[in-house]
Image (cartoon, rainbow, N blue to C red):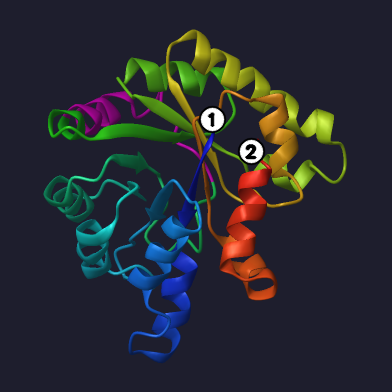
Amino acid sequence: MTKLSVNINKVATIRNARGGNVPNVCTVAIDCEAFGAEGITVHPRPDERHIRFQDVWDLKAILKTEFNIEGNPTPEFRKLVLAVKPHQVTLVPDAHDAITSNAGWDTEKYCDFLTEITTEFQAAGIRVSIFVDAQARMVEYAAKCGADRVELYTEPYATNYPLNREKAVAPFVDAARVAKRLGLGLNAGHDLSLENLNYLHTMIPWIDEVSIGHALISDALYLGLENTIKAYKSMLL
């Protein structure tokens, strides 16, 4: 079964726009779990423009499902993850000023660095997923780095889906097959939505987990959070 992990960064963005604690990030996370999400994802950035480091601690204390922390493994990020010890850490190569993640790792170029980070987190009992583009070589080198999983960066799939869904999904199917052959777990995320999620899952039914934030939180403005989570989960059956 493919699990749904809800990325709640956008909830924190709304909160931070006015200060205070409305909407409450922890309350939303608990509701997501109650409505059927199998995990919660956060992506704390150095400027804390959405998820704050304190949010990570607060969530760790209350979550009952899988906790996934994603981000660029800067010294500060590494310190936080090692202290909190989530179930999973997803390594993402985003610049400090990036609006959102926009590429996967060059796992060949950064193999030594990623191996060091992966070993460090695994020694603390944390599963490691490396964010990669849908390219066989990047998946292969993620395996050489010792990763437990890869997360396929799905923005290109989402962008090209309305034009030609068969062509859009093809490189992702190929990359997913490489991951499967190498014994890597498989995650996927970025710009997945109610429009394109089911087809991706149909073509790659062995995906372990999808992490979805922007589209899901946006849909919840219209459908309500409970109905939205149920709708996304129905795409994964």
Q: Which residue is the extreme one toward the front?
A: 34
Name the side, left or right, on which 199 lies relative to 14. right
Residue ID for mark 2: 236
In front of the other: 125 or 236 = 236
In front of the other: 94 or 218 = 218
**Which label number is shown at residue 1?**
1
* Image location (x, y in percent) of residue 126: 22, 35
**Residue at the (40%, 44%) spot, across then down:** 92
* Image location (x, y in percent) of residue 209: 49, 37
* Image location (x, y in percent) of residue 1: 53, 30
Q: Which residues are magenta?
A: 103-119
Looking at the figure, which quarter contains the C terminus? Answer: top right
Q: Is residue 114 magenta?
A: yes
Among numbered discs 1 and 2, the one appearing first in the sequence? 1
Residue 215 seen by the camera: no
Say which quarter of the image contains residue 12. bottom left
In front of the other: 73 or 38 = 38
